[in-house]
Amino acid sequence: MDAASCCRVFSTTQRYRLPLRRLAPRRPFCTEPTSDAFATSKRRSRGPVMAAKKAAQGMKQEDGKYKQTVDLPKTSFGLRANSVVREPELQKLWEENQVLKRVSERNTGATFVLHDGPPYANGDLHMGHALNKILKDIINRYKLLQNHKVSFIPGWDCHGLPIELKVLKSMDKEALNALTPIKLRQKAAKFAKATVTTQMKSFKRFGVWADWDRPYLTLSPEYEAAQLEVFGQMVMKGYIYRGRKPVHWSPSSRTALAEAELEYSDNHVSKSIYAAFKITNPSKPGLLEEFLPNLCLAIWTTTPWTIPANAAVAVNPELTYAVVELQSVLESESTSGGNQRKLGSILSPSCEKPFIIVAADLVSVLESKWGTKLVIQKSFPGSALEHCRYIHPVNGNECSVVLGGDYITTESGTGLVHTAPGHGQEDYLTGLKYGLPIVSPVDDEGNFTAEAGQFNGLSVLGTGNSAVVKYLDEQFSLILEEPYKHKYPYDWRSKEPTIFRATEQWFASVDGFRDAAMDAIKRVTWIPSQAENRIVAMTSSRSDWCISRQRTWGVPIPVFYHVDSREPLITGETIEHIKAIVSKKGSDAWWYMTTEELLPDKYRNKASEYRKGTDTMDVWFDSGSSWAAVLANRDGLNFPADIYLEGSDQHRGWFQSSLLTSIATTGKAPYSSVITHGFVLDEKGFKMSKSLGNVVDPENVIVGGKNQKEEPGYGADVLRLWVSSVDYTGDVLVGPQILRQMSDMYRKLRGTMRFLLSNLHDWKPENSVPYSDLPKIDKYALFQLENVVASMKDSYESYQFYKIYQILQRFAIVDLSNFYFDVAKDRLYVGGRVSFTRKSCQTVLNAHLLYLVRAIAPIMPHLAEDVWQNLPFQHTLDDGSAAEFVFNLKWPVRNEEWLSVPKDDVDFLSVILELRSEVNKILESARTGKLIGSSLDAKVYLHAENANTVSKLKELSSATNDADALHRLFITSQVEILPSLREETTSGVSYTGNFSDERTGDIWIGVARADGEKCERCWNYTRDVGSFLDHPTLCARCHGVIDLPPVPAAAAVS
Ligand SMILES: [Zn+2]
């Protein structure tokens, strides 16, 4: 039922706002298109409204005789939002009046700083951006209402590979040949700035309030200088070093990649091999000599191309290993089955079988895998194998068995790990322990170098890999080759597989400040709280941060190298000098200025001995320095920020990089609280993708898609309402169905606000009825309002906006539309223009309007402002000025008086509401059974045994204030409390039911036709209709109000 009656009333209003004669006769009553939510129900019919309607249609002129005396709602606030047109108008109004700036300046509370994580300046905005920025805006706007000064500086991340690649892709071969670094950088900057402009426009259209005139861009000279300052401080503290270490390397992009630049594919298939390395010299006398000379170590690897870089074989000293004899080969190569599984020649019948060392626990697994019989000859602990020597299968050098760590298990492989320190993190660490060489014979493009001998020039992810396998087989080193499906890191941009490769890179030594970081994490509030575990895990386990990239579009690593010794030159002085240049000219200067100009005075005469470095910084270092470039550098902000709010992937991205740079240089986390949100998926929980056709574009949600029928333009507030409705701590869903629900909810809320506005058209604040004089039902309404707004405040404070959505939904539909508004219509329309009953109701409606408009403003600022701009009276602030815009208001102050309703009354009224639902059901069957038409044709009988219940029911049914009377609450003409259920009193009552509640005991309900005659004006039945000679068709109440003078506000309270 909910908004149904609103709809009717509003439709009527619509008609009365227009000159009546312009309306064609016999038009359907409800002229607006209705959705399900607004479908008309016939259960309630408003007497006066119907009468007025008939008059309007010119049906029975006589019925409309009193229509001029009916106070129908009036408002200029449209039933339909017309958001596509109206929202930009409101945004313009805010912008022209600098509402954000003026409100923030006027607020007297502490400054609130939500620091914006910079989106990447590449491409159009998607729903993830919308979710993120709107959540931030809801928080900022709420803080404004809470009297905070709010300064929100929007940011953009402008450097990096994706933009560089986009620029390169857009150029033809000729242009590429003529490309210089500085030209590339100019094009990239232009592209980034253009994207910033487009994205900014979209963010503004979402209704996001920010300091759009002063955004921060990571490419601006002052930003770059601040970043170099952070870098310089880390250098001076000894946290930055140059080293040769394996890093994630993308051959397709020819650069090192950070963990955050990787995507893990679950479907990657590697060529895995089992290989045998021949032992020459067992370390422990007496342990293995008996098996020589044909004894091998068996290893397993999924990257055969790293075999040329092998430097050791690692075992776990805690595991047991065994020498096994390879006996009969159970299947020959030809019968080894399809699936590209291939037995090595070592297993061919003609080959003499070696003894092989594997982990004892894996013997049976390997037997079935290799299709051989493995007979254990001897077993011993892994520690006994340390320093055992074997022949490198490719270069023939002697290498050692070393002891690795817990990473060596018997979950897969052989329990012996091929160790190439140039190509793996654990291998690198084991290598450090044993002083192993860091061999990495692979170039930037992923091809073997001359160091790899015969494999020189082959691609390690392609032909090079196969060539190594083939070579091993020829050397009788290959046991088995088979495809292996596993998780594998891909370049997030090129979508190509990456490799681990040791290169000379610049690193931030996380070990130097890890403890401080872990400590700081504990002092930050993480929302949701589980997020703390994620950041702890990422920070405690991470290796040193590789911050150099071999690309052009970024902030340079400000280092010079000695031409001969290749020693880097990087001192406080050099960094300071470069920083000063960059702050004026931007980082382009690094490329167009000479080494001599870039060196400080002290080194200038030696400029010829140096060349400048060509590496740029990891873009995560850029964005990770934003606290320094923005929070610490600009007026009106705070460090640390109150809140950082981003997607949960930023635990390894921006939250992490910001934490590391800030801890390293200031010892503090850059944020007091961190809020994370999940990803936006389609309605079925699938990732959005163009190929699935399930992408929801925020722009289309707002202004509509190509096909407006399938993708209507809902406006920014519907998008924002959706953002508020989801529990963003996990992944969230959106799609056409969900958006339609949001649009329905929006319309209900709009209808609620419209009901309030339109019934206050003649309201003046001085008409307010003092609280103590209000009828019970009105006090109860204010009690509910205060409670509802208090819970909404709690939910804003805890950032649980979906709870606000739920509260609003229930309040607007159940409490207001279905009950208070429904009941209020009689008083408002026919109670008499200047009657006490209408004024007390308007007092309550006014409170609802002023409270709700603020409570919804952070989520639906356009709706709230639209309401405010259509306010039929002026609202004066405490300082005497008029509130021109809704954000001139503050969050409502808690009203203790409204909460003072005795608990007994609250309880009883809530029981009455439940009783009312029961009564409505019986009225409905009476209507179906044609006993009554509208509920006003009915009289309700009640009987209760419980004396207390009886007296309370009697008290309510005899209320004289016209508001609390029970028949008004039921919207029937009469209610009678029966002293007993004797036959003579109940015989005419054909529709009955029961209500039972422990607080009231059983209540019997009966419905019959109302007594007396129907009043022409209000449609209530009374026995006094016909007793007034001048108005024979009116009841006493109507008779008493129609002759009153039209308006005068000061006219007496009835
Ligand atoms: Zn009447």
Image (cartoon, rainbow, N blue to C red):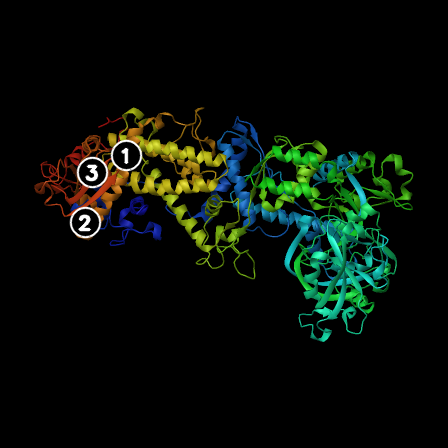
The amino acid at mark 3 is: His
Residue 317 coordinates in the image, percent (x, y) = 76, 49
In the picture as drawn, the residue positioned furthest to the bottom comes out as 334
Q: Quadrant of residue 1032?
A: top left
Residue denoted by label 3? 967
Q: Nearer the viewer, mark 3 or mark 1?
A: 1
- The answer to whether marks 3 and 2 mark residues whose Cβ atoms lie closer than 8 Å is no
Residue denoted by label 1? 909
Graded by Cα atoms within 10 Å as few (under 14), some (14 to 19) or many (20 or more), the crowding at tag 1 reads some
Observer-nearest of 184 and 118: 118
Q: Is residue 58 left or right of residue 365?
A: left
Observer-nearest of 730 and 9: 730
Q: Give the mark nearest the N terminus, 3 or 2.
A: 2
How far apart marks 3 and 2 lie (CA) works out to: 16 Å
Graded by Cα atoms within 10 Å as few (under 14), some (14 to 19) or many (20 or more), the crowding at tag 2 reads many
How far apart marks 1 and 2 lie (CA) works out to: 25 Å
Q: Give the mark nearest the N terminus, 1 or 2.
A: 1
Q: Count of labels shown?
A: 3
Residue 575 coordinates in the image, percent (x, y) = 80, 37
Residue denoted by label 2? 926
The amino acid at mark 2 is: Ala
Look at the numbered disc 2 and give the secondary structure of its residue: helix
- 234 lies above or below 309: above
Graded by Cα atoms within 10 Å as few (under 14), some (14 to 19) or many (20 or more), the crowding at tag 3 reads many
Residue 374 disc label: none
